[in-house]
Image (tube, grey):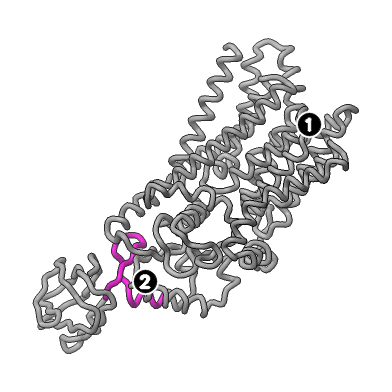
Amino acid sequence: MKKGLFERITFIIIGILWLYFSFFHCFDDDEFQHCHNAFLIWNGLTPYKDFFEHHIPLYHIFFSPLFISGSHYWTIFLFRIISLLCSFWTFSLIYRYLKKNYDSSVAVISLILLAFVPMYLIKMTEARPESIAVMFFTIATMSIISENKNSFISGLFSGLMCCFSQKYFFPWIGLFGANIIITGRKNIKPFIAGSFIAFVPLVLYLFLKGIIPEFMNSTIIINFKWKYRFSPAGYLYEMFITAGFLVACGISGIIGEFFIEKNKKMALSLLCLLTGCFLGIFIVPVPYRQIFLPVFIVTTIASGWTIHKISGIIQQKKLEILSGIILIFCAISSAITSISKEFQQTNFSDINKMKKIDSISPDTTFFDGRCLLYYRMHTGYYGFMHHELLQMLDPEKYAHHIIESLKKNNFPVVIYDYRVKEMPSQIQDFIQKHYCLASEPDIYLPGVNIDRSQLTGGKTDFDIFVSGWYRIYFRGENLLIDGTQVRDNTQIFLQTGNHIAETDGFVEQITMILEGRK
């Protein structure tokens, strides 16, 4: 097999794999939150004031025009395409650097190792700002270590990286240190100037909206108050199990270059970058997979030296291509096993649920914990909720706010997801009292459940809180609502207020579910 053909086949396989994950892999809850914030900004709402936001909003501001065509469940895939394009550009930058400094074989092998890292593949194809931040990190790194060094450009893209994800402040420290090592102290000012300029559009937006204090509180101060923490040990284990060969090659490359006199500065700069990345992993309170992404960029770049040495040995033997394929396959075998399991995790169930809710309860706000209906207005100040954030709130105040918001929004559709089930008991009780299960497994609409124990004497009253058409379900004999006989699985119109249910026989259960609002 010719080398050029092998490269083309490799790129096609990587492209197909990454395209599949972009369009079919399951959604992370963070994706809904990021897309929803962009939707809210597009519709004229102000972050921190009109809705809760604890990220730097530049990603949401910049990509809010993706909702120009309206509110659609598929808009999230436009965000994923942006992530995919950024990922491919990152691949391109690394490939060109390694090809120029070593050869195309080294570049291809390094990219294969990177492309098949499960946590890198999954997070870089999701609708999240980290994919763009990682691209900026790569550009900033190349501006330091390549022949055409430019401290200002490196500082500019380092700042943009932080504008898209404040989690990457520690990689910024690594870039700052690497810049000093490579270009000297004389270039500190251009680097700092570039970083400050990167924040100008963001600061201008915050100033014009009058939300600088709220921004400081929600993106910086809140991180020092974060109560929930966990060790990065689990994800570190995952990293070394699925990407151990890449990490080992990267570290070996740094060590190898250090003992080459002309490359010593390069080795120290890469070590500084890697140190900054690991600082983030160990200092950030909740080191999820996305905080690991810059590590893979640095180790891929640094792995060039090691892979070049290995490929030099292989080239001295016969069956060069076959030996290389076997080496690569063994290196990524654990990653392939992990990726194959991810093929079972699709986004079909979430998409079907979006379509279902749009059909049975269109044009209303919604309430849930995941922000599944990211393309519609949510209920209350918080567009999403998770246990980490809930620990920082007063449970009673939060419950009161949500209950009042549900009433104010005329009892919108509720998605009773796992996050709602973690919310205060007052919210659970309110939903159980005022809502009924409309569709499995967790779609709830306003309604009434009347148990047979309430029909003692054949009569009971009940309250309707939303005027509209209700579907009546019951098991038993004759049922009258406000004196009018109704049949099972029929629709009647009920006004807001008190109503009477009567029966002259045995009725086990009565359920009334809102199907159409007035």
Q: Quick one: label 2, few (<14), some, or many (20+) residues within 10 Å?
A: some
The amino acid type, in three-letter code, at marker 2 is Asn
- Left-right relation of 185 to 92: right
Image x and y of residue 170, in percent? 73, 51
Sequence-first tag of 1 and 2: 1
- Left-right relation of 159 to 469: right
Location of the C terminus (image quadrant): bottom left
Image x and y of residue 172, in percent? 74, 48
- Left-right relation of 24 to 453: right
Q: Quick one: label 1, few (<14), some, or many (20+) residues within 10 Å?
A: many
The amino acid type, in three-letter code, at marker 1 is Gly
**Residue at the bottom extreme?**
457
Label 2 sits on residue: 409
Magenta region, residue range: 428-448
Q: Secondary structure at mark 2?
A: loop
Q: Is residue 349 above or below residue 303?
A: below
Q: Residue at x 34, y 65 (%)?
A: 413
The mark lying in front, picked from 1 and 2, is 2
93 and 42: which is toward the camera: 42
Location of the N terminus (image quadrant): top right
Residue 467's image quarter? Answer: bottom left
Q: Is residue 315 above or below residue 450?
A: above
Image x and y of residue 234, in percent? 65, 52
Residue 166's image quarter? Answer: bottom right
Whether residue 431 is in magenta: the answer is yes
Label 1 sits on residue: 253
